[in-house]
């Protein structure tokens, strides 16, 4: 039988599609082979059984002792000559006259020695290399044979797997071709929005569903409320127009209602689903079984009032079913678009996995720098990259070339001016000039990734809280259905008018708004927490916000919270007959390995004194050993000092030295006691059981510390300062920043107990400090870490901190804003709850009394939900 033109066209179209598919796959395979070749993989060898002997031989290393290497200038040339041999990698160390060579096992040693001889150098294998080669020769032979057998087995298994995989792909391709998947336009991958178990499935609420419902709802409304346009059998036409709306348009709500019934739960949109279904079925029953379906029937509907006369002979509610569906769809889409999602915003600043960056590398042989385009996944710590102007910085690093103003809004840090030795972070947008950056952290080790993980965990915690609120609100759905059924029964018995009774019951189902009750707290809380994160303030969960509202006392740790962190040595007061320079040098030696601000200041001052002093009685280097730090933060160790013996000879002896801080005025006497309370932070230096001097250190308060403390005091929050200093010194510092109370002489091991004691006296305590008071965060009502990006050793520690609130920056100005925002958010949530309950109670009562038309009930339901959403967005000012 001859082939028809249509069949011929279909056949030609299928051939063209098959040819295009084959061409596309072939092109992809070619690109993959080329990419493999670029990284040194020969794909042709993967399909052969025989490999070169070098493939199985493995690699080994050699160490040569060189004689005659008189100049370092020829090292690069010799290394290049050696590496011209197949598989050879060579490194020559001039200072030790050694050559380290890595090569294939079968390399000819004489060839390597010949190259050295060509440059006038005698090369001899070291004894360890000779012994290793003799001892492992048999082992390597066995390894060589096992390698060949293992590869042969792997090759056969790989061939079998690839053959099986090719058959499966061919079957899948044939299935897709038969099912028409490859017909028509190009294949597209559509991003599906995540479903939300708290509400109706979001991916089902689409714009097309909304547009289709609106297109059919408009003529239904016009015909129902304009009697002049009602023609013969208009009611049947309206029923036909309404059917797609209540089925296709309202399908997401019906689906959630049925899914809730299957799980023994109440969907939030369950009452609306029941109302839409009953409104349509009731109206359809009236058309079929009563006079409403006659040709001469005309309707005079009311929009927002119940007209009792209209229900005597029956009333149609197709308009209510369509309008309720349209409003629900429009409201859900509007709310979904208005809610900001911080994880989505942060993901936009993440480096694209397959993107590349320019890496600057220096060649060893000639010292020249070259630029290479390298994938971001292959960046290593220590690499130097170039970030052009306007590009997103893909790593955390340090600027080693250029200067620019970067946009760090993704981390809540605003605009940052950076230059050489300045820090930059992944996700920040470079300014108008290119920067050369040395990589410090990549991928999940960056601060952007750490903040993203924190926000994700916070979102999960918030989901648990939202689920509880939704479960509570869902009880309103069966309650509303029971009230509607009771209302219908009472109205039907009292008036003997089932149409009017149904109208009041439908109004009950239409006005109830469990969604408004469910989102009263969740949306406001989520918006507030995410907005705080946009400003660099990370809040753990909703419970933290509630506890912040209850805080009435704040304890600041002086170092890290109120002070700048960088300290300087102000004075050195030596005891009678003691050398002040030696006192400072001993303090620097004992604190050499500590990262505390006090230790850094002492070490820096001691080094400056050593470099500038001409006193020969103090050795240039003081030996120290057995350094220990006790629970009070005191340093002890053995140091070698010049000591005079009984005959007056000076010799170095090991003595026990200690560095400690006085707690009160009774710890010292005389001039040392006066120095300890004069000014600054006192440090006492002792050796051989005698206090030799007092070093006072000074640190400036943060520029915004005073204004922050004043703002907290104005809010009625009592402020305290925790310090290791004696009371006069701590009180003086507290007065400079405006703190009301000072807790002085508190050693590091006693800080937790001190915070707990304040808490046990009935105060709701918020502890503010850096990572050094992490233990205090656990015993306080709320722990607030300041300056996480400077105090934490790396971003991964952010997940392990006990702090409930983390300030990425070191400023204290966000702290008053944090507490005032928490109070404002809690007031907003409470008012949302009150409004939602009042609305539902008043609306249901009005509907039961017959004062609420079903159409007006639908409008009020949507208006209440949107009002709650609008009020919740006010928390963005948190």
Image: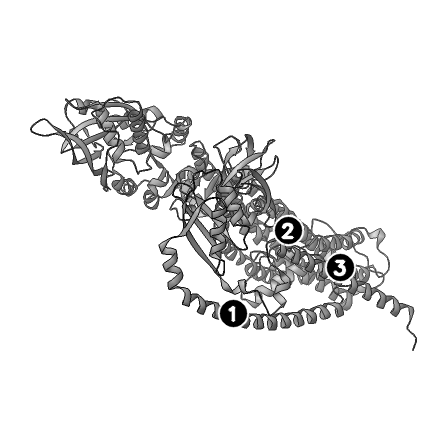
Give the secondary structure at mark 3.
Answer: helix
Location of residue 476 by image quarter: bottom right
What element does badge 2 sit on?
A: helix
Identify the image quadrant of the N terminus.
bottom right
Furthest residue toward right? 2
Residue occupied by mark 2: 332
Which is closer to the viewer, label 3 or label 1?
1
Q: Is residue 25 left or right of residue 146?
A: right
Q: State the residue in front, 239 or 608.
A: 608
Residue shown at 14% from the left, 33% from the top:
688
User: Callout 2 environment at 10 Å: few (<14), some (14 to 19), or many (20+)?
Assistant: some
Q: What is the C-alpha distance between the residues marked 2 and 3?
A: 20 Å
Q: Are marks 1 and 2 in contact (CB under 8 Å)?
A: no
Q: Secondary structure at mark 1?
A: helix
Residue carrying label 3: 242
- Nearer the viewer's eye, disc 1 or disc 2? 1
Residue 639 location (% of width, % of height): 20, 36
Residue carrying label 1: 148
Sequence-wise, the earlier of marks 2 and 3 is: 3
Question: Measured from the top left, where is residue 479 in percent x and y?
Answer: 54, 59
């Amino acid at each position: 039988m001859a082939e028809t033109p249509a069949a011929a066209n279909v056949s030609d179209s299928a051939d063209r599609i098959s040819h295009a598919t084959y061409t596309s796959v072939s092109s992809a395979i070619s690109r993959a082979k080329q990419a493999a070749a670029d990284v040194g993989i020969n794909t042709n060898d993967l399909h052969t059984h025989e490999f070169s002997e070098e493939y199985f031989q493995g690699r080994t290393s050699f160490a040569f002792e060189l004689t005659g290497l008189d100049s370092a200038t020829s090292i690069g040339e010799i290394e290049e000559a050696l590496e011209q041999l197949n598989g050879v990698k060579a490194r020559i160390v001039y200072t030790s006259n050694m050559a380290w060579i890595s090569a294939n096992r079968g390399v000819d040693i004489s060839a390597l020695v010949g190259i050295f001889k060509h440059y006038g150098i005698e090369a001899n294998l070291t004894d360890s290399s000779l012994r290793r080669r003799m001892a492992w020769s048999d082992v390597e032979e066995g390894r060589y044979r096992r390698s060949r057998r293992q590869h042969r087995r792997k090759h056969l298994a790989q061939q079998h797997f690839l053959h099986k995989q090719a058959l499966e792909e061919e079957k899948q391709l044939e299935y897709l071709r038969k099912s028409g998947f490859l017909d028509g336009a190009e294949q597209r991958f559509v991003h599906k929005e995540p479903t939300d178990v708290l509400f109706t499935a979001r991916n089902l609420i689409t714009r097309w569903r909304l547009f289709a419902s609106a297109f059919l709802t408009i003529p239904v409304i016009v015909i129902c409320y304009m009697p002049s346009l009602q023609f013969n059998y208009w009611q049947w036409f309206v029923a036909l127009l309404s059917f797609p709306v209540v089925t296709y348009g309202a399908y997401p709500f019906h689906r959630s209602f049925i899914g809730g019934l299957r799980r023994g739960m109440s969907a939030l949109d369950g009452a609306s689903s029941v109302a839409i279904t009953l409104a349509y079925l009731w109206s359809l029953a009236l058309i079929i079984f009563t006079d409403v379906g006659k040709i001469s029937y005309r309707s005079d509907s009311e929009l927002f009032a119940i007209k009792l006369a209209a229900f005597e002979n029956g009333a149609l509610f197709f308009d209510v079913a369509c309008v309720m569906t349209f409003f629900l769809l429009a409201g859900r889409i509007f709310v979904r678009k208005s809610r900001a999602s911080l994880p989505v915003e942060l993901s936009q600043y993440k480096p694209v996995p397959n993107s590349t960056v320019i890496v600057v590398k220096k060649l060893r042989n000639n010292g020249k720098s070259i630029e290479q385009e390298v994938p971001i996944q292959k960046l290593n710590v220590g690499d130097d990259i170039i970030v052009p102007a306007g590009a997103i910085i893909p790593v955390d690093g340090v600027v080693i070339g250029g200067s620019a103003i970067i946009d760090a809004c993704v981390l809540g840090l605003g605009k940052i001016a950076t230059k050489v030795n300045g820090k930059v972070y992944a996700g920040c947008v470079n300014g108008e000039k290119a920067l050369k950056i040395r990589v410090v952290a990549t991928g999940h080790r960056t601060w952007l990734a750490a903040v993203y993980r924190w926000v994700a965990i916070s979102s999960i915690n918030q989901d648990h809280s939202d689920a509880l609120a939704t479960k509570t609100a869902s009880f309103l759905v069966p309650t509303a259905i029971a009230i509607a059924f009771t209302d219908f029964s009472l109205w039907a018995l009292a008036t003997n008018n089932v149409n009017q009774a149904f109208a009041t019951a439908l109004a009950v189902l239409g006005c109830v708004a469990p969604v408004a009750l469910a989102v009263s707290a969740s949306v406001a809380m989520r918006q507030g927490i995410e907005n705080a994160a946009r400003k660099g303030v990370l809040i753990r969960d909703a419970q933290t916000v509630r506890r912040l509202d209850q805080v009435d006392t704040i304890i600041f740790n002086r170092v890290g919270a109120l002070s700048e962190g960088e300290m300087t040595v102000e004075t050195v007061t030596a005891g009678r007959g003691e050398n002040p320079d030696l006192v400072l040098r001993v303090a620097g030696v004992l604190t050499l390995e500590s990262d505390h601000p006090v230790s850094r200041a002492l070490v820096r001052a001691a080094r400056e004194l050593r470099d500038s002093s001409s006193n020969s009685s103090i050795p240039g280097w003081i030996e120290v050993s057995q350094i220990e730090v006790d629970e009070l933060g005191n340093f002890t160790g053995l140091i070698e000092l010049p000591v005079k013996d009984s005959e007056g000879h000076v010799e170095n002896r090991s003595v026990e030295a200690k560095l400690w801080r006085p707690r009160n005025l009774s710890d010292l006497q005389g001039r040392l006691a006066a120095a300890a309370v004069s000014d600054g932070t006192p440090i006492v230096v002792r050796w051989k059981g005698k206090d030799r001097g007092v070093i006072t250190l000074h640190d400036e308060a943060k520029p915004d510390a005073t204004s922050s403390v004043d703002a907290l005091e104005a809010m009625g929050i009592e402020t305290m300062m925790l310090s290791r200093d004696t009371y006069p010194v701590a009180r003086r510092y507290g007065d400079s920043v405006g703190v009301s109370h000072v807790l002085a002489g508190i050693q590091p091991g006693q800080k937790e107990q001190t915070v707990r004691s304040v808490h046990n006296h009935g105060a709701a305590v918020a502890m503010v400090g850096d990572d050094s008071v992490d233990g205090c965060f656990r015993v306080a009502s709320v722990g607030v870490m300041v300056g996480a990006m400077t105090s934490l050793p790396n971003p991964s520690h952010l997940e392990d901190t006990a702090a409930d609130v983390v300030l990425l920056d070191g400023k204290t100005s966000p702290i008053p804003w944090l507490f005032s925002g928490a109070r404002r958010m809690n007031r907003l949530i409470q008012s949302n709850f009150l409004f939602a309950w009042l609305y539902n109670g008043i609306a249901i009562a009005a509907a039961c009394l017959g004062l609420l038309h079903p159409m007006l009930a639908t409008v009020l339901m949507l208006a209440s939900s949107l009002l709650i959403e609008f009020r919740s967005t006010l928390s963005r000012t948190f």
